[in-house]
Image (cartoon, grey):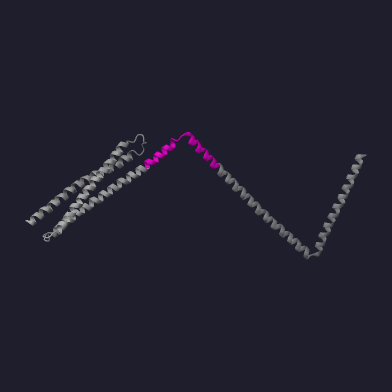
Amino acid sequence: MAAIGGSNYWEDLRKQARQLENELDLKLVSFSKLCTSYSGSRDGRRGETSDTTPLLNNSTQDRMFDTMSVEIEQLLAKLTAVNDKMAEYTNTPGTASLNAALMHTLQRHRDILQDYTHEFHKTKGNFLAIREREDLLGSVRKDIETYKSGSGVNNRRTELFLKEHEHLRNSDRLMDDTISIAMATKENMTSQRGMLKSIQSRVNTLANRFPAINSLIQRINLRKRRDSLILGAVIGVCTILLLLYAFH
């Protein structure tokens, strides 16, 4: 009698497991269709503006998604509990002779539970990713529309800022060109100064080597000073004579 009672208990658990598995299969099919229709409806309305998009349909689909998610999670929890009871039954005394068959059946139900759980989380993750992406795109489109519909004052202010920015960039470029020219001029003058010093050094070297040349250069300089003094004296005398003639 105990074996018969245990067998009935096992069969009841198997019936509960099969019933929950069938319900989960139907729920998961509907859940997958909901997610697919949600993605398709979003893609079909992507080019529409926020004024023509049927927001009620989106909110209805979101509510259906939340409701079905809760229902599927509850069914998964119930099926997990049934599997746990089946596992406890396989460990009860008196079932050793049937243990291999029971374990095989239990493993099959566990595999089904694992497959349904994986499918549910995968479909739910895809749905949430699509909704997050579409919400982000909608926010971007709204920002673009807000920017396009901005007041003329803001657009004018932005235009002035852009012009001022361009003016500053041109000024910086002009300053850079001026600094570059000044640096090139400085380098050229430094080079010329070095060349003059080199020439003067060579002339001094030649004058020191050849005293005759040095003496000739000194005499030329003295003659130039004498000619300058004579010319200055002549100019002074002429000026005095002109003044005397003018006053007479």
Frontmost residue, 57 versus 48: 57
Q: Residue furthest left?
A: 1
Above or below 74: residue 208: below
Question: Where is residue 2 drawn, in percent x and y?
Answer: 8, 56
Residue at figure coordinates x 20%, y 54% from the top left: 110
Residue at figure coordinates x 21%, y 54% from the top left: 111
Quadrant where the N terminus lies? bottom left
Quadrant where the C terminus lies? top right
The boundaries of the magenta stretch are 137-166
In reply to whether residue 147 is colored magenta, the answer given is yes
Residue at figure coordinates x 23%, y 52% from the top left: 115
Residue at figure coordinates x 48%, y 34% from the top left: 152
Question: Where is residue 140 drawn, in percent x and y?
Answer: 39, 41
Q: Majority secondary structure of the magenta segment? A: helix
Above or below 140: residue 203: below
205 left or right of 248 in image: left
